[in-house]
Amino acid sequence: MNCPECDATLNIPGDASVGEIISCPDCGADFEIAKKDGSNVELKQAESVGEDWGE
Amino acid sequence: MSKVCIVFDRLRAEEKMLQKEASDLGHDAVMLDAKITQVNTDSKREDYDLGDVVLERCVSYFRGLHFTASLEFMGMPVLNKFEIANLCGNKMFMTLQLKKHNVPTPKTYFSFSSESASENIDKVGYPLVIKPVIGSWGRGVMPLKDKDTTDAIFEIRDITDSPHDRIYYLQELVQRPPRDIRVITVGDQPIAAMYRKSSGGFKTNIALGADPEICEITKEIEDLAVQASKAMGGGILGIDMMEDQKNGLIVHEVNNTVEFKGLVRVAKRNIPREMIEFALNYVRK
């Protein structure tokens, strides 16, 4: 699968789960796995770090 | 067999470890993304696949807090409870709660406008540390050593004027070695601890690159962690302590959605397993 931002090849591990974040090795954009059905993966833009993020 | 529901908004190593441990213990673990879950005033527990108990693990504090309110409204047991999350997520509420329960904590000053905060600094002097009441990972935590820096920070706050910027939380700058201690407590029991060594500045947050190192849980650390946990209401907590050169161990922060992926590599006890076991025992009681 290619990065929706820069078209580089994304390395999505086979055991990745819905909700996990995938980072593009080339442009650094973050994507969240929205759906996963076998090898079919749907990505959405990951949320950016919010003021209230943390522990 | 029991079922644990892990509520998340960003699936991190911690949530995956919790899921795996639940499964290894022979229980079901269901993952629920708070971002895509809808709730209304007629919502019932049985409308969702929530299992027996929920571990709330959102990285966004406000999302997690409000989601917890929805779940408790449906009668669902949640760790941590709304009340605990509410106290821990706001540094001012947390500090007041610690002090109220006689947990040693740094001297902290509260003001409710920049003018009033400046007046207070004129009285108490420098150095101080300013912290946002909401926020984590050391963001916005800054040492105040002189009037010029303070005026600049206050001016920026007045310009941005987000609601929490109007609350001025100023703390004494504690003299301590360049490290602090993070203790994870589960049901008022400390299960693991680490030193977090500063990576150069005065902050010791792992998220900022501080070096984790295993810390032996001494009787003093244990007693203080238990006292702090009880003050906040128990549950699963990350308690941060400093070795104050004047007053010995003091608690400066209690975290509600504790991160543990660094500590888990060196801890003697299985942190996610203890959390899952505690959660299931919590509802069996």
Image (cartoon, coloured by chain):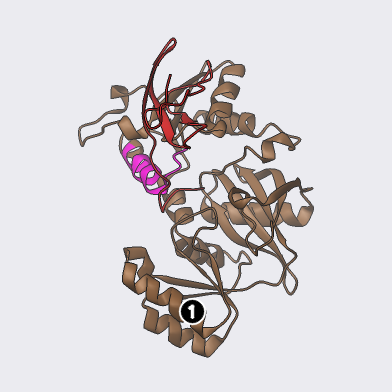
The residue segment tinted magenta is: B57-70
Which chain does tag 1 point to? B
- Image coordinates of residue B173 in percent, x first then y, are 62, 73
- Image coordinates of residue B139 in percent, x first then y, are 50, 58
Give the quarter of the image for residue B107.
bottom right
Q: Amino acid at mark 1?
A: Thr
Q: Say what secondary structure mark 1 lies in.
A: helix
Horizontal side of B183 relative to A16 (left or right) equals right
Look at chain B in the picture and name its colour: brown
> Residue B58 lies in magenta, yes or no?
yes
Residue wearing tag 1? B150
Q: Is residue A18 above or below residue B12?
A: above
Horizontal side of B99 relative to B6 (left or right) equals right
Q: From this viewpoint, is residue B28 visible? A: yes
Look at chain A in the picture and name its colour: red
A2 or B74, which lies in front? A2
